[in-house]
Amino acid sequence: MTWRWRYENANGGEVTDRPLPREVFPSQADAESWLGENWRDLLESGVEQVALLEEDRVEYTGLSLRQE
């Protein structure tokens, strides 16, 4: 199984109009660690929230990159 992030705008639509990292991870923990190290760069690139996918199954969605 592989894990990946789907990058979303504030409305939950997928961000596809700019070059963003397309990393694939062997585990959920690896994906979450990567996000912990890279969320600021994603936010600066216009990503507002993310969804975590295992293959095509959504593990969770709507995870905001903004500190509230």
Image: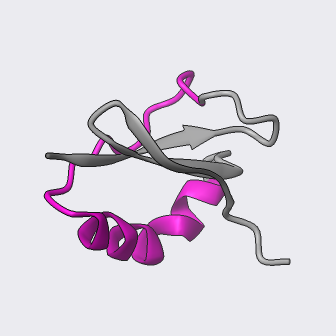
Q: Is residue 5 above or below residue 31?
A: above
Question: Is 17 displayed left or right of 20 in the figure?
Answer: right
Question: Is 28 displayed left or right of 65 in the figure?
Answer: left
Quarter of the C terminus within the rendering: bottom right
Q: How many marks?
A: 0
**Which residue corresponds to the image point at 20% horizontal and 63% vertical from the top-left?**
27
Question: Is 59 displayed left or right of 7 in the figure?
Answer: left
Residue 52 placed where, x, y %?
45, 50
Residue 22 placed where, x, y %?
31, 40
Seen from this angle, which residue lies furthest right?
68
Q: How is the image coloured?
A: one colour
The quarter of the displayed image where residue 40 is located: bottom right
**Which residue corresponds to the image point at 34% horizontal and 30% vertical from the top-left?**
56
Q: Is residue 39 above or below residue 6?
A: below
Q: Which of 3 and 49 lies nearest the eye of the viewer?
A: 3
In the image, residue 32 lies in the stretch drawn in magenta: yes
Residue 33 placed where, x, y %?
34, 76
**Which residue corresponds to the image point at 81% horizontal and 35% vertical from the top-left?**
11
**Which residue corresponds to the image point at 75% horizontal and 68% vertical from the top-left?**
66
Q: Which residues are magenta?
A: 15-44
In the image, residue 34 lies in the stretch drawn in magenta: yes
Residue 34 placed where, x, y %?
34, 69
